[in-house]
Image (cartoon, helix red, strand yellow):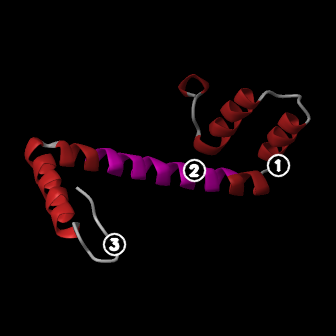
Amino acid sequence: MGTQALTGEGVEELWEQIEGHVAWARECGEFNKRRARQLEHEVFALALQRMGERMRREARSNPDLAGILQSVAQRETDPLSAVRQVLTRVFSVEDGEV
């Protein structure tokens, strides 16, 4: 099956194929599974974005966090240890949870 944008040839057939695929996906449950995965991804992406924003704000206003970042920059602290320290201070996460 081919389509031609200039003439519109094949577009109707393509649309029918798309509608058929969507109908199949809905009938077998695949549509809802994909949508659930998309929504989960969206929730986690937004949560990570907000967490990142909060950590950056905290780093600008909290001398302890700024010190942790400086320690990493000077290679006195490894990044993973710094992550643990930042998460503990910003989100009250226990070391074993990181």
Q: Left or right of 61: which side holds 12?
A: left
Dot 3 or dot 1, earlier in sequence: 3
List x then y, in percent, for residue 36: 27, 47
Which element is circle 1 on? helix
Q: Examine the residues drawn in magenta and state their main secondary structure.
A: helix
Q: Nearer the viewer, residue 7 or 45?
A: 7
Q: Do the residues labelled 3 and 1 touch (CB within 8 Å)?
A: no
Q: Is residue 64 above or below residue 96?
A: below
List x then y, in percent, for residue 40: 36, 46
Give the residue type that dot 2 points to.
Met
Marker disc for residue 63: 1
How far apart marks 3 and 2 lie (CA) works out to 44 Å
Which element is circle 2 on? helix
Tell me the residue at 45%/47% (across/down). 44
Quadrant that contains the C terminus:
top right
- Residue beneath disc 3: 5
Tell me the residue at 89%/28% (across/down). 76
Please identify the residue farthest to the bottom as the structure is shown. Answer: 7
Q: Please state the extent of the stretch shown in magenta in the rendering.
A: 36-55
- Residue beneath disc 2: 51
Dot 1 or dot 2, earlier in sequence: 2
Tell me the residue at 77%/57% (across/down). 61
Is residue 54 within the magenta segment? Answer: yes
Give the residue type that dot 3 points to.
Ala
Please identify the residue farthest to the top as the structure is shown. Answer: 96
Quadrant that contains the N terminus:
bottom left
Q: Left or right of 80: which side holds 7?
A: left
Q: Nearer the viewer, residue 10 or 44?
A: 10
List x then y, in percent, for residue 7: 28, 77
Query: Which numbered mark, 3 or 1, is in the foreground of this view?
Result: 3
Label 3, residues with CA under 10 Å away: few <14, some 14-19, many ≥20: few
List x then y, in percent, for residue 87: 63, 38
